[in-house]
Image (cartoon, rainbow, N blue to C red):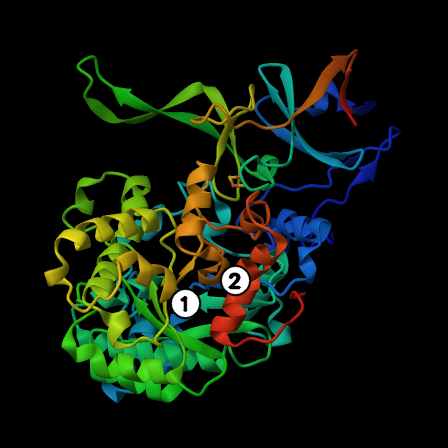
Amino acid sequence: MTEHAIGNLDEFIDGEKELLSVGGIDIGVFRLDGEFHAWKNVCPHQGGPVCQGRIFKRVIDNLGPDKQQHGRAYDESQLHIVCPWHGAEFNIRTGIHAGIPELSLDPVEVFVRGEKVYVRVD
Amino acid sequence: MVDHRAGPVGKPTQQGVVKPTLQDIDTYTDTRDYLRHSREHAETHGYIDWTIVDMDAHHVESISWKEIVRFIDDPVLRDQAERFHSERVGSPPYGLVGDFGLRYQDVGGRIPHQSDQREKIDPAKGVHRDVVLTRRAMEGLACAYMVVFPTSMLFLGMHPQAQMEVALGNAYNRWVQQTLLSDDNGIIALAYLPFNTPDEACKVVEEFANNDRVVGFTVTSTRYKPVHSNEYMRLYRMIEESGKPICFHAGYHWQDPSLATIPTFLGMHSLGFVWCNMVHMTNWILQGIPERFPKMKSLWVESGLAWLPFLMQRLDDQFLMRQSEAPALKMPPSEYMRRNCWYSSQPMERSNIKATELTFEMINAETQLLWSSDWPHFDFDTPRVIYDLPFLNENQKRNILGRNAQQLFNLPDRPAAKA
Ligand code: FES
C-alpha cells in the first residue's frame, strides 16, 4: 500500500466530492460532516463509473401514524452517490447500496494527518 | 483513453497524484467517455477482437422529426406536418403518441444519458447527429454492428388513426435509409411495419426485402391486434420468403387498465415491457404460426429473459390438458419457443445466477440468444453481462455476443467501431 497526499483539508468542501486518479486507480473522495470517505470508481453492478455520478438525498416514504402514505420525502441525513449508468444508489458513508445490502462499493483508505488528506492504494 | 471533452487538465502534485483527471458525468458527457469502462473491459479481456453485434440500441427520432415528416407520402399530411413544425410551439412532434412514462426514464435526473445527449458534435463534418452518436456508442460498447430502433415510435401501434401509423412509419423507414444507413458504418436497421394495416405492411416487405442493410421487419408490440389474425397470413408468407426475421419489439402502455393500477415507473415498466410480448407469444405459438410458416424466424426483443421459463412451463402445462384448443401443434409449446424463436438479452435478469443458467438452457441460448444493449436507455447492458457469465464457454459467449446475430442477419465479420 502506498500513501498519497491528495490535497489540503480546506480544498475539500463538505457535502461534495473530488474525483481523482491515484496510482493509476480512479477514486471518488467525499467529505461529509467533516469525515472523509473514499470509494473506487467502479460500480459493483456492471462496472460503471459510479463516483462520476450525482449526489442525491435518500428518498423515503412519508407514512402517517395510520400507515397511510402521503407521498415521498427526503432523509436529509443520508446522502447517496448515484451511479450514472443505471442509477444504483450507494450510501456515501457506508458504500452500501440503498436497498440491497449485499451490494457495496470498493473502499479506499482515506485519512487526515495535520492539514493534509491522504489515501492508501495498492 | 482520450478525454473528448473540453475541461480542466490534471496537474501533477509532489506525490505523483494527478488531479482532477475525472469529471462528473452529465448530459454533456461524450458517449465515449460515458462508456469508457465498457470499452476498457473489452480491451482488457480481449473480446474487443470479436465481431460483437448489438441487436437492439436506440436513437431519439423525435429530435429529427422535422426532417422525417418531409418523407411523408401523402401531400396533405406532409404539408400539415411541415407547417406544424415550422409554426407550432409547445406541442410534441407531429403525429407521435409517446407514452407519458417516457418522462420518468431517467429516475429524476439520476441517469443523465437517459435525460438527454447534449454532447458536442461537429456540424462541419456533415455527418448526421444520430450517426455520430450511434458510432460513439458502438466504440464504447466495442461493437462492430449496432441495430438501431426508434424510441417514441415504439408506441405508434396505439395511434387512433391507423393511416398515421402507415404515413409516419413509411416516412421513418425512408429517412432511416437516407441517414442512418447511408454509409457502410456498421449501423443496421429493421423496417417499421405498419402492422395495424396489413396490406401496407406487405408493401414495406416488398420495398425492403432485398435491401442488405435492412435486416428484418419490426412490429412494435404495444398494440391490441391479435398476431394470428387471418389478415396477416399474406404478410407472414412474404416475410418467410424474404428470409429475414420478424421482430416483436416490446414497449409498455401505462393506460392499460391493469398497468394503470401501478403508481411507479419501476412497477409498470417491470410488467409492461414483458406483458405485450407474453400475449403475442401466447397467440403466436398456440395458434400454430410456427407450424404454418416453419421457416419464418421470429425475434422477441427487449423483454429480458425471465419471462421465458415461466411462459414455457405454463403453456406446456395447460397444453397437456387442452390439446384440442391448440390442434395445430405437433409438440409442446416450449419446443417451438426454443426452435423457432430468437431472443434479445436485455435487460438480462441476473439476481439469481442459477435461474439465469437454467433460462439459457431452456431457450437454447447458444443458438437462440442475441446480446443487446438498449443504449442509451436507463437499463442498458454492456457486453460484459454475457462475457462474465461463469457457466458459458468461449464459443457460447462468441455466439451470443455476435455470431447468432451474424447468422440471423447475414453479416460478415467486422472489427469493432472506432468513431
Ligand atoms: S453499473 Fe452502476 S448502476 Fe449499473
Circle 1 sits on which residue? B61
Q: Nearer the viewer, residue B97 or B57?
A: B57
In percent of width and height, residue A101 lies at 47, 23
Please rate how many residues cluster around mark 2, counting C-alpha atoms within 10 Å: few if below 14, some from 14 to 19, many from 20: many
At 14% across and 59% down in the image, what residue appears?
B323
Near-viewer residue (B61 or B166) = B166
Label whose residue precedes the other's in the sequence (1 or 2): 2
Q: In this image, B408 relative to B241: left or right?
A: right
Quarter of the figure that contains the C terminus of chain B:
bottom right
Q: Is residue B201 visible?
A: no
Give the alpha-carbon distance from disc 1 to disc 2, as whole Å.
19 Å
- Residue B292 against residue B392 in the figure, above or below: below
Residue extending furthest toward the right: B14
Question: Can you identify the residue that label 2 sits on?
Answer: B54
Query: Considering depth in this image, is B34 or A6 the residue closer to the camera?
Result: B34
Q: Position of residue B348 (x, y in %)?
A: 44, 48
What is the chain identity of the residue bearing mark 1?
Answer: B
Taking the image as shown, residue B227 lies to the left or right of residue B58, namely: left
Q: Is mark 2 within 8 Å of ligand 1?
A: no
Q: Chain of mark 2?
A: B
Q: Position of residue B160 (x, y in %)?
A: 16, 68
Is B331 or B315 nearer to us in this picture? B331
Characterize the local packing of mark 1: few (<14), some (14-19) or many (20 or more) Cα atoms within 10 angstroms: some
Which amino acid type is marked by label 1? Glu
Q: Nearer the viewer's eye, disc 1 or disc 2? A: 2
Give the amino acid type for the residue marked by disc 2 in the picture: Asp
Q: Secondary structure at mark 2?
A: strand
Taking the spot 22% from the left edge, 84% from the top edge, the residue there is B199
Picture quadrant where residue A64 is located: top left
In the rendered view, does B361 fall on the left or right side of B328? right
